[in-house]
Amino acid sequence: MEDLFSCSYQGMVKGYSGVFRLGEATSTWDADSPVGACSLVIQREPWEHIKDNDIKKTAASFVGEIWQVPPMFSAIKVGGEKMYDKARRGESVELAPRRISIFQFDIERSLEDRQNLIFRVTCSKGTYIRSLCADLGKALGSCAHLTALRRDSIGEYAADDAWEFKELEDAIVKSYF
């Protein structure tokens, strides 16, 4: 059954939304700290110079087929071992870039905190949003990490179309009585 799931769902186009934080990088490229880490933020770079128009233009340059290097903290196996296990031990392995597709990349600054960028991405399988974030930060002359992520859709299935638990419960009760 797992192979059927993998083949039919994992290959579908995916939609994500979330938040990138400019000017700060972490070892995991997101806000989660690895076990035993002393400090979450490992790099700080100026970000105040980045104009809103530069953000939109740079994001647009990622749309299409691009090469992307997966993050060290990923489930990709190298030598039969997951990369995140190697990364937790402090081992570094140079991963080869992979060809992925970004179909849509909408982004704008948060009104509450100008250091945060709110984004929506539609992409192919194999895309790492943490890598996209790090690459965008670098392309803007700074750095960035992912602070929030939500999968909005996979193929034709959208999270906004999902039932709330109460709706599901009501449908089950209605179908049995």
Image (tube, rainbow, N blue to C red):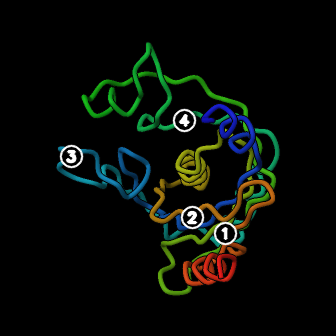
Q: CA distance from mark 2 to mark 4?
A: 19 Å
The residue carrying pointer 1 sits among few (fewer than 14), some (14 to 19) or many (20 or more) residues within 10 Å by Cα, namely few
Q: CA distance from mark 3 to mark 1?
A: 33 Å
Query: Which-is-in-front pick, marks 3 and 2?
Result: 2
Pointer 3 residue: 37
Q: Are marks 2 and 1 in contact (CB under 8 Å)?
A: yes
Q: CA distance from mark 2 to mark 1?
A: 9 Å
| Amino acid type assigned to the residue bearing label 3 in the image | Ala
Pointer 4 residue: 70
| Amino acid type assigned to the residue bearing label 1 in the image | Ala
Pointer 2 residue: 150
Which is nearer the N-term, disc 1 or disc 4? 4
Which is nearer the N-term, disc 3 or disc 1? 3
Task: Give percent across and percent down for residue 83.
Answer: 41, 28
Q: Quadrant of the C terminus?
A: bottom right
Pointer 1 residue: 159
Q: Is 143 drawn above or below residue 119 in the view shown?
A: above
Query: Which-is-in-front pick, marks 2 and 1?
Result: 1
State the residue at coordinates (80%, 39%): 65
